[in-house]
Image (tube, rainbow, N blue to C red):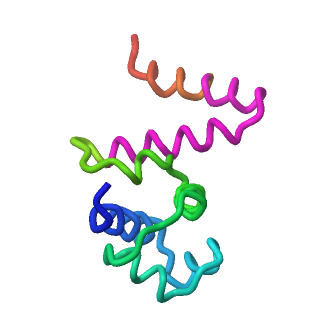
Amino acid sequence: MNRKVLGKRIREERLRIGLTQEQIAEYIDVSTTYIGFVERGERSVTLEKLALLAECFHVSIDSLLREASENASDKRLFDELCFLWNAASTEDKRLIVSISNVIVNRHDP
């Protein structure tokens, strides 16, 4: 994985959720300077910190590591849905499926 590509993805995700470098640094327990280095591709990020970043951004680790995505917006939404699914109880998962069925079938006659 190219550090510059990863850094760019991390910056994009940080901006997408509206957090500052300071907030991200505090969340993963590093310095703001370190976050700047990572976002510019000047430093590597450990697997532990990458996992924390993915958790913070509500995306999977592999979505941060992907070089390119043909439909990045859909992928981000899918990753967020997966994160929520994994955090949900069995009862909540049933509710998610029921709501999804209503949404998908709302235009059927």
Residue 94 among magenta residues? yes
Q: Nearer the viewer, residue 63 or 13?
A: 63
Quadrant where the C terminus sits is top left
Residue with the most extreme left position: 70
**Is residue 90 shown above or below 51?**
above
- Quarter assignment of residue 13: bottom left
- Residue at 38% x, 51% y: name it: 65
How far across and how far down the image is residue 78, in percent? 44, 39
Magenta highlight: main SS: helix
Quadrant where the N terminus sits is bottom left
- Residue at 45% x, 18% y: name it: 105
How far across and how far down the image is residue 104, in percent? 44, 23
How many numbered callouts? 0
Looking at the image, residue 43 sits to the left or right of residue 54; the answer is left
Residue with the most extreme bottom position: 33
Looking at the image, residue 1 sits to the left or right of residue 95; the answer is left
**Is residue 7 shown above or below 92?**
below
- Residue at 28% x, 60% y: name it: 2
- Residue at 55% x, 38% y: name it: 82
Residue 52 among magenta residues? no
Q: Nearer the viewer, residue 67 or 89?
A: 67
Instruction: State the extent of the magenta-drawn residues as a range.
Output: 73-97
How far across and how far down the image is residue 10, in percent? 40, 66
**Is residue 106 shown above or below 64?**
above
